[in-house]
């Protein structure tokens, strides 16, 4: 019976080829658009998803734009449960022109990369970076984007830290995981601090964020509370939170945009669902005499309903399958063009699962009413339609 249903469904699907092809094309476009929009949302949350569970970020309690003294590092390190501490400042330089944006951080060369095992750097390149005051470590995608190689000189025009700066690429890091951001640029905090001391001594020895790794068995909440209590009522009170919460605060700033994209992705599915329902309604109406004949021959109403459902699912799953197959290559093309906005732009497994579910929902919902009408059609009314 199942084989028979499948054969009939395939034959019925191809009976009106133009209508079927147009509907199929619509489903492909809808599932493809849905997958790409969901990939954009995933890319927006890539930093949140990649955050380590054992890392905390300490910043000024007022805002990220306010700094903290370097002396806080030793006091943080002395807190129970703290295993390692490092620090970073946002640099904000311009490479050639403003369109070439990429994240730039001045970091402590001796401690920062120990806290980020997801950045894979060869020991020789890391040692070269630690020796060279003007040295930088850059991500593999960033290096590929601009054609940089180890030993190249990279000029940046300072914005926060004004002036013309020149850096030498000491190493290129690879991401341990697909979700690791390979578009970052790391320079020496000491080198930056020396320049600040010479130009504006009052602004020297200031830190943007401290990065903390807490010991196994310790709770993030407990360590965060102890760190913040240490600096309560000081001139620069602190706010310590998990790395995930820290990243989430940036996503929250654009929460309305993410919500809008999510709504649009579901609207696309609803539209194609309506188109598919109209297609199946037309097909079922045209075949009312055939369904009546089947019932006259003794086939139960359920079999007639299953025929309509099988045809709808065959069309929806064929379009959905092609849309799913086209999503990764197209996402790769789009991701290569948006590297500076979305460092990680890959189709997640959850996105594919949602696409499959969407195709099933389209097929099932489009067949409900036509199948019900076909099951309840009276034999005499159906046979009357035969000309």
Image (cartoon, rainbow, N blue to C red):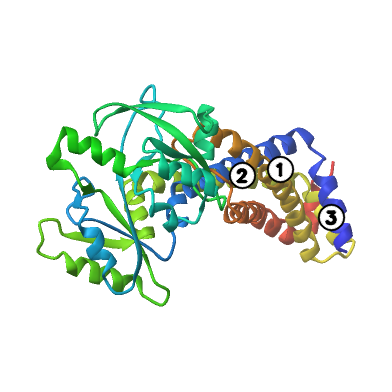
Tell me which residue sits at (72%, 53%) in the image.
313
**Left or right, 154 with reference to 74:** right
| Image depth: mark 2 or mark 3 in front | 2
Q: Residue furthest bottom?
A: 217
Task: Examine the image and state in which quarter residue 29 appears.
Answer: top right
Residue holding disc 3:
6
> Is the C-beta separation of discs 1 and 3 under 8 Å?
no
Q: CA distance from mark 1 to mark 3?
A: 19 Å
Residue 76 image position (x, y, % from top left): 25, 64
Tell me which residue sits at (38%, 48%) in the image.
109
163 or 228: nearer the viewer: 163
Residue holding disc 2:
31
**Left or right, 13 with reference to 113:** right
Residue 16 image position (x, y, % from top left): 79, 37
| Rendered-image quadrant of the N terminus | bottom right
Residue 369 image position (x, y, % from top left): 64, 55
Number of numbered callouts drawn: 3
347 or 224: nearer the viewer: 224
Residue 90: tell me if it is visible: no
Q: Secondary structure at mark 2?
A: helix
Q: Secondary structure at mark 3?
A: helix
Residue 322 image label: 1
């Amino acid at each position: 019976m199942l084989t028979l249903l499948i054969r009939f469904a395939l034959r019925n699907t191809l009976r009106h080829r133009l209508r079927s092809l147009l509907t199929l094309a619509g489903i492909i476009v809808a599932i493809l658009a849905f997958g790409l929009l969901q990939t954009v949302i995933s890319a927006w949350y890539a930093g949140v998803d990649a955050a380590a569970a054992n890392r905390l970020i300490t910043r000024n309690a007022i805002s990220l734009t306010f700094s903290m003294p370097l002396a806080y590092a030793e006091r943080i390190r002395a807190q129970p449960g703290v295993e390692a501490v490092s620090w970073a400042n946002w640099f904000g330089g311009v490479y050639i022109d403003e369109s070439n944006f990429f994240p730039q951080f001045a970091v402590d060369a001796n401690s920062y990369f120990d806290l980020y095992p997801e950045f894979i750097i060869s020991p020789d390149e890391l040692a070269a970076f630690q020796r060279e005051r003007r040295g930088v470590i850059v991500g593999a995608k960033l290096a590929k984007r601009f054609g940089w190689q180890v030993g190249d000189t990279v000029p940046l025009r300072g914005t926060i830290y004004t002036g013309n700066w020149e850096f030498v690429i000491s190493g290129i890091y690879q991401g341990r995981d697909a979700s690791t951001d390979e578009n970052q640029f790391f320079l020496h905090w000491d080198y930056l601090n020396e320049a600040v001391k010479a130009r504006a001594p009052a602004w020297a020895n200031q830190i943007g964020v401290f990065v903390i790794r807490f010991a196994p068995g310790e709770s993030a909440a407990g360590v965060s509370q102890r760190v913040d209590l240490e600096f309560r009522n000081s001139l620069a009170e602190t706010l310590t939170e998990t790395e995930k919460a820290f990243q989430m605060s940036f996503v929250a700033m654009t929460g309305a945009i993410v919500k809008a994209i999510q709504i649009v992705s579901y609207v696309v599915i609803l539209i194609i669902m309506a188109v598919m329902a109209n297609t199946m309604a037309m097909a079922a109406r045209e075949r009312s005499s055939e369904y009546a004949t089947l019932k006259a021959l003794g086939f139960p109403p359920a079999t007639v309903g299953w025929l309509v459902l099988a045809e709808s699912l065959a069309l929806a799953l064929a379009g959905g399958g092609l849309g799913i197959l086209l999503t990764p290559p197209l996402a790769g093309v789009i991701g290569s063009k948006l590297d500076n906005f979305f460092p990680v732009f890959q189709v997640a497994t959850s996105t594919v699962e949602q696409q499959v579910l969407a195709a099933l929902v389209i097929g099932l919902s489009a067949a409900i009413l036509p199948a019900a009408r076909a099951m309840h059609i009276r034999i005499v009314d159906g046979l009357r339609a035969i000309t």
